[in-house]
Amino acid sequence: MPRKIMLVFFLFISEFCYAQVVVSEFNLSDINRGGMTKAQAEKLLVIALKYQKYDLSLDGVFVDGDLQDKHGNPPHPGYYDFSLGYDTSTAGAIDYWGLFSVSSQTGDIWEINKCERIIFPQLQKIQQEIMKKTGATFASEVVQRRGLGCTDE
């Protein structure tokens, strides 16, 4: 029995420490009422991808944030779009792992090919702080979220 208690305690402490590291990796001080920059959105996405167990340290893995329409606008107003993929000289083609949209106002993150929202407690803490700075809420983004083709309604 004491062994189980120690294991549970260790897991709790590990998760708590990881949560603190994740939150501290993201600099909230530069976010203003206008929302996140593309660079900040990418940093938040990278934190979420690491949490989702994507190995971003592999040679050939990339996050491409240069997604825009023919007029230079992002495909989803209010969101920054990023593709995640893998490319090596030995591969016959680029392997795309996902297409992600990050809200500039709330930090809401969606994998839009699968229509899956990325949610975990540490990310939610960061998102709450972003929303305090921008004044936006998930509810205020319903219209923009519909533009992704994915909703939580």
Image (spheres, rainbow, N blue to C red):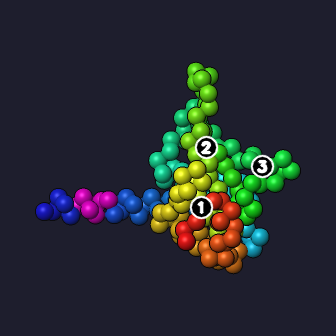
| Amino acid type, residue under disc 1 in the picture | Cys
| CA separation in Å, label 2 and label 1 | 19 Å
Does dot 3 land on a helix, a strand or a loop?
loop
x, y (%) of residue 66? Answer: 75, 46
Residue range in magenta is 6-11
Q: Secondary structure at mark 1?
A: loop
Identity, as a three-letter code, of the amino acid under mark 2: Leu
Residue position for label 2? 84
Q: Is 60 situated above or below 123? A: above
Specify which label sits upstream in the sequence, 1 or 3.
3
Q: Residue at x 84, y 50 (%)?
A: 72
Disc 3 marks a residue whose amino acid type is Gln
Residue 68's disc number: 3
Image coordinates for residue 133, horizontal then vertical, percent: 68, 75
Residue 31 visible in image: no
Residues at discs 2 and 3 in contact (Cβ within 8 Å):
no
Q: Nearer the viewer, mark 2 or mark 3?
A: 3
Indicate the quadrant where residue 11 lies: bottom left
**Residue marked by disc 1:** 150
